[in-house]
Amino acid sequence: MGYLINDAPNVLSSKNNGKLSPITVLKRMKDFKYVVGQAVNDKIIPYHPFSEFQMYEKGKTPQSRFGDWMTPEEIKLLLDNPLPYEEIHNYFMFSCNSSMAFAECYALTWGQISDFEEYSTIKYTRKKTEKPRTLHISNQARDYLGDRGIYDSKVFNITKSNRTIC
């Protein structure tokens, strides 16, 4: 699986810098698991080498371990003890409160945000589906955006790599 994620050559056009998306990798692994199962059924190979390997299926969320996501208490702890990197803190808290994906938060500009008295809206094109979307955000999420900047400027001045974000 690591080969598919990191090293597999992608011969199709890609918006992911020539890398396979996680969904594509999952689909390829499911296909491979099925083909290996057929080889066992047809007695080409004696056993299924990864029959116990579980994969996510649509509509069947895998059982999470407690440490997979931050608990509300952990988010409150972060809120009460902000990181020394204010921009990263505001980005993270905004994403927690708005549910916008990393790519959309990274590309977010002030021109996409409309402020109203009770809420704000963000109009953007979803990177994954290329479909336009309007997102209503609460005043709490809007507070993490800070003071309005120049129309075409990015809201968050952060690195694009989520590996070096902290």
Image (spheres, rainbow, N blue to C red):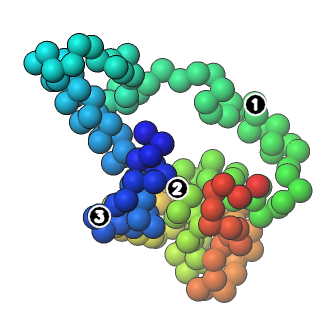
SS state under label 2:
loop
Circle 3 or circle 2, nearest the eye: 3
In depth, the one of 2 and 86 nearer the eye is 2
Direction from residue 1 to residue 159 in the image, left or right? right
Q: Is residue 123 above or below residue 88?
A: below
Q: Position of residue 31 (x, y in %)?
A: 24, 36
Residue 164: name its quadrant.
bottom right
SS state under label 3:
loop
**Amino acid type of the residue that numbered disc 1 sits on in the rendered structure:** Glu
Kindly report the distance in space between the C-alpha atoms of the residues bearing marks 1 and 3. 45 Å
- Please report the residue visible at 26 percent of the width from the left and 34 percent of the height from the top: 32
- Please report the residue visible at 62 percent of the width from the left and 66 percent of the height from the top: 160
The quadrant the C terminus occupies is bottom right
- Estimate how packed mark 2 is, as few (under 14), some (14 to 19) or many (20 or more) residues with alpha carbons within 10 Å: few
CB within 8 Å, label 1 to label 3: no
Residue designated by label 1: 73
Residue designated by label 3: 11
Residue lying farthest left? 42
SS state under label 1:
helix
Direction from residue 13 to residue 119 in the image, left or right? right
Kindly report the distance in space between the C-alpha atoms of the residues bearing marks 1 and 2. 22 Å
**Amino acid type of the residue that numbered disc 2 sits on in the rendered structure:** Ala
- Please give the label number shown on residue 163: none
In depth, the one of 54 and 129 nearer the eye is 54
